[in-house]
Image (spheres, grey):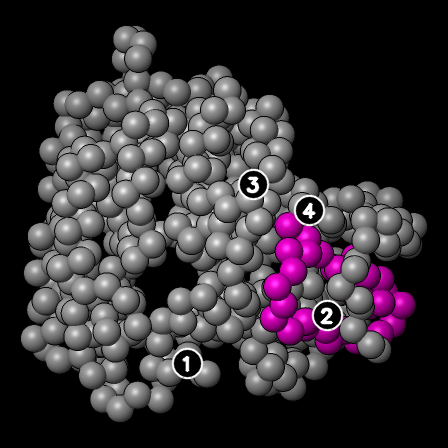
């Protein structure tokens, strides 16, 4: 079957949706989407859910077996890939018992030809395979599947923004994900993302502002702007808007209460963006700023294009302009090829100096097709595990100290949901991104509430609502 043309129009989308809907028993077909990886993937799954809803499918409850299941995959680390293999393999028996079960696998793993080929060879009962660039054609792929055709269709990298305007089924009633750009041009030596997400493509600012206005009017008070590197937004866009300008314009939308964004590459974090963060109350005092290593030599080998000293100067500037209260989080890789014990200790010392509020910490995971996977000096797993253990212990200690220092302080909390552990409590985030749980009911969800911090746990804070308004 030839590849569906990239001009997959709204009319064609509607036609394929209508065809699928006409073939389904009304209200009886259930779906489930398993999402792995980043917020970009989570938002892609929201778009898939919207298409399924529009075709007459109903999301399965936790205890229900779905008639269609989609695995939206991640390939940043081996662990995520192994989970996909395990979960797809677990469906073998059910597929034998129910041939009408539709199994689809999509996302970043499928953009790697060898990985997709091996997965289908190992699990030939998979019905649909597609990638990140043709997600918007899913109704056409599903139609072909229901007509009896095994579907294997992954588009190559392209510079299009196809599907960027697709509506989303957002489960969270408070925070809305909004993509502002796709892809990455940085080519860090360890990272597979540029190869599976393609080159950087920025959405037109008018399109973004329209989407933000629409979701804010629907009651989503917090906007999370997404991109592999939001700081490079605007490169190649005709109107030459940069990310700082976009952020400023979004903050002018009255219904928007808070704005967050991720991810930021340190080399592209401009003074203008820092000024917008410092001067605009709607822009949260939180920044995810991946450092990856505290060693300049390792950073050079990673092709990060900044040094340890550059990064520390940036942190000083952020705290000087935005304030000491800014919630800094990061990503760190230990055991990168050639990393010596002394270089690892440089990472520990940087973590001690910066004092991140939280960190995502990982052992280096070789990714096929990246430069680092072929580098000499691959570190033994035992060494990587020990270094990761030391790093986690240090960061947990720092996070605990920061949390203890918040006891007695009053923080504005945007309530997101009921607490998962306490039926009589709700949870939300502070301006700096810390999760706080306190007594309350559903009427508080979506509201900004002043909360006095009374408890400090390793990952969350506890508090009590106070009557004073901000």
Q: Is residue 174 above or below residue 310?
A: above
Mark 4 vs mark 3: give the one in front: 3
**Marks 4/2: CA–CA distance:** 20 Å
Q: Secondary structure at mark 4?
A: loop
At 31% across and 50% down in the image, what residue appears? 269
> In the image, is 463 to the left or to the right of 257?
left
Give the mark nearest the N terminus, 4 or 2.
2
Q: Is residue 248 above or below residue 292?
A: above
- Any magenta on residue 296? no
Q: What residue does disc 2 label?
A: 128
How busy is the neighbourhood of tag 1: few (under 14 within 10 Å), some, or many (20 plus)?
some
| Residue drawn 42% across the image and 53% down it | 232
- Secondary element at tag 1: loop
Q: Under tag 2, what secondary structure?
A: strand
Q: Nearer the viewer, mark 4 or mark 2?
A: 4
First reached walking from the N terminus: tag 1 or tag 4? 4
Locate residue 127, reporting x and y percent.
74, 72
For residue 190, side relative to residue 208 (left or right): left
3 or 2: mark nearer the eye = 3
Q: Comparing marks 2 and 1, which lies closer to the viewer?
A: 1
């Amino acid at each position: 079957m030839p590849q569906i043309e990239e001009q997959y129009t709204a009319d064609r989308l509607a036609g394929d949706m209508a065809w699928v809907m006409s073939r389904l028993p009304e209200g009886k077909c259930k779906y489930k989407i398993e999402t792995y990886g980043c917020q970009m993937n989570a938002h892609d799954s929201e778009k898939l859910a919207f298409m399924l809803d529009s075709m007459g499918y109903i999301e399965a409850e936790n205890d229900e077996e779905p008639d269609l299941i989609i695995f939206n995959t991640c390939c940043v680390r081996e662990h995520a890939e192994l989970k996909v293999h395990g979960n797809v393999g677990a469906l073998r028996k059910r597929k034998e018992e129910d041939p009408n079960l539709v199994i689809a696998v999509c996302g970043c793993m499928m953009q790697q030809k060898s990985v997709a080929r091996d997965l289908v060879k190992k699990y030939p009962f998979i019905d649909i395979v597609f990638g990140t660039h043709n997600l918007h054609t899913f109704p056409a792929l599903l139609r072909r599947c229901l007509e009896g055709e095994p579907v294997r269709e992954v588009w190559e990298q392209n510079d299009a923004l196809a599907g960027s305007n697709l509506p989303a089924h957002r489960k969270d009633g408070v925070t809305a994900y909004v993509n502002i750009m796709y892809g990455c041009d940085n080519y860090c030596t360890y990272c597979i993302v540029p190869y599976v997400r393609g080159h950087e493509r920025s959405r037109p600012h008018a399109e973004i502002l329209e989407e933000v206005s629409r979701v804010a009017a629907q009651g989503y008070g917090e906007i999370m702007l997404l991109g592999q590197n939001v700081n490079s937004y605007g490169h190649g866009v005709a109107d030459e808007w940069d990310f700082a300008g976009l952020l400023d314009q979004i903050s002018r939308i009255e219904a928007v209460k808070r704005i967050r964004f991720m991810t930021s590459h340190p080399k592209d974090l401009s003074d203008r963006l820092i000024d917008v963060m410092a001067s605009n109350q709607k822009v949260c005092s939180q920044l995810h700023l991946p450092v990856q290593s505290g060693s300049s030599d390792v950073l050079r080998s990673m092709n990060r294009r900044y040094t340890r000293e550059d990064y520390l100067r940036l942190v000083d500037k952020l705290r000087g302009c935005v304030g000491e209260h800014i919630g800094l989080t990061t990503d760190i890789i230990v055991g990168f090829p050639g990393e010596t014990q002394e270089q690892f200790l440089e990472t520990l010392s940087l973590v001690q100096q910066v004092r991140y509020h939280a960190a995502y910490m990982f052992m280096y995971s070789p990714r096929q097709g990246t430069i680092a996977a072929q580098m000499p000096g691959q570190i033994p797993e035992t060494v990587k595990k020990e270094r990761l253990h030391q790093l986690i212990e240090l960061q947990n200690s720092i996070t605990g100290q920061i949390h203890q220092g918040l006891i007695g302080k009053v923080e504005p909390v945007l309530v997101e949901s009921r607490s998962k552990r306490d039926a009589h409590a709700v949870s939300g985030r502070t301006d700096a991104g810390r999760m706080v749980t306190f007594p309350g009911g559903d009427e508080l969800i979506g509201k900004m509430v002043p909360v006095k911090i009374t408890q400090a746990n390793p990952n969350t804070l506890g508090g009590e609502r106070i009557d004073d308004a901000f």
